[in-house]
Image (tube, rainbow, N blue to C red):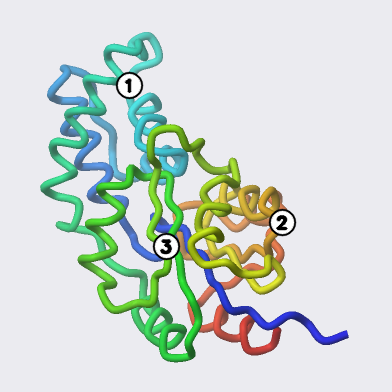
């Protein structure tokens, strides 16, 4: 039986397409300073991201200061800073611009599904990847649960109807692999992101790749 050809590639954003950790850390530390709380070293942040900005803020606050008010105040400060500075230090991972260009040239449909809030996702994608064939650019919006809930993948599929057998979901974390599993689509874990390869293996990634070009290989051998 011939494998299904892949026609729709859905990407996570942070840690998958872009190394955003410096800008995320700077915005979070700005929020911590503004509220009078301790800041964190850059090396701490890869383990704090992945479940949305509100969860990042909660994790950054001291254990005894995670009240709803502090989270909301820090989140507002984060967005104030990040909205102006989200493209200062962020960079595409090596090979990602070329990957998106190649997939677009091959006629594949692309999407981004992120736990980051929608306004930031829209701005970042427009800045870094204006010519890629993104059929859906989705961040977190009110009323939509965050990954690993698969609702955001279903939304991406509704915007570009595609049989699930023709979909690849690409991400860098266990959250992403669980999202793909719950959406019943094939998962690809990338090793260049924020999470260790052990997390991808423990989350039962269908494929694990160490270079963007290997993603093309998965599509061409499907």
Local packing at callout 1 (Cα closer than 10 Å; few below 14, some 14-19, many 20+) is: many
Q: Which mark is residue 61?
A: 1
Picture coordinates of residue 6, whole percent (x, y)? 63, 79
Front residue of this view, candidates 69 and 126: 126
Picture coordinates of residue 139, whole percent (x, y)? 38, 48
Which comes sooner in the sequence, label 1 or label 3?
1
Local packing at callout 2 (Cα closer than 10 Å; few below 14, some 14-19, many 20+) is: some
Label 3 to label 2, Cα distance in Å? 19 Å
Picture coordinates of residue 108, whole percent (x, y)? 50, 81
Q: Is residue 148 above or below residue 97?
A: above
Front residue of this view, candidates 177 and 139: 139
Picture coordinates of residue 45, whole percent (x, y)? 36, 41
- Name the residue furthest right: 1
Q: Is residue 80 left or right of residue 20?
A: left
Which comes sooner in the sequence, label 1 or label 2?
1
Q: Is residue 75 left or right of residue 193?
A: left
Residue at numbered disc 2: 184
Give the position of the N terminus as an image quadrant: bottom right
Tell me what residue is drawn at x 41 percent, y 38 percent: 52
Answer whether labels 1 and 2 touch (C-beta < 8 Å): no
Tell me what residue is drawn at x 45 percent, y 65 percent: 111
Residue at numbered disc 3: 136
Q: Is residue 1 left or right of residue 162?
A: right
Front residue of this view, candidates 198 and 106: 106
Of marks 1 and 3, the one in the foreground: 3
Tell me what residue is drawn at x 41 percent, y 46 percent: 46
Q: How many marks?
A: 3
SS under mark 1:
loop
Answer whether labels 1 and 3 touch (C-beta < 8 Å): no
Tell me what residue is drawn at x 40 percent, y 14 percent: 63
């Amino acid at each position: 039986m011939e494998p299904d050809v892949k026609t729709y590639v859905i990407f996570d954003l942070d840690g998958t397409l872009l190394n955003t950790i410096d800008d995320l850390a700077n915005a979070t530390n700005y929020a911590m300073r503004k509220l009078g709380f301790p800041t964190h070293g850059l090396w701490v942040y890869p383990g704090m991201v992945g479940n949305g900005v509100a969860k990042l803020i909660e994790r950054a606050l001291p254990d005894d200061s995670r009240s709803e008010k502090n989270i909301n105040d820090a989140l507002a400060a984060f967005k104030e800073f990040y909205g102006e500075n989200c493209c200062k230090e962020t960079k595409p991972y090596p090979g990602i611009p070329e990957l998106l260009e190649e997939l677009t040239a091959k006629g594949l449909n692309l999407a981004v599904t992120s736990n980051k809030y929608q306004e930031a996702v829209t701005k970042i994608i427009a800045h870094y990847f204006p010519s890629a064939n993104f059929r859906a650019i989705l961040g977190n919006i009110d009323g939509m649960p965050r990954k690993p809930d698969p609702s955001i993948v279903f939304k991406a599929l509704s915007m570009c109807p595609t049989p699930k057998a023709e979909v690849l979901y690409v991400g860098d974390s266990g959250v992403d692999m669980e999202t793909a599993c719950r959406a019943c689509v094939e998962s690809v874990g990338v090793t260049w992101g924020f999470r260790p390869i052990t997390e991808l293996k423990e989350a039962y990634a269908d494929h694990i790749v160490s270079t963007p070009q290997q993603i093309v290989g998965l599509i061409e051998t499907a």
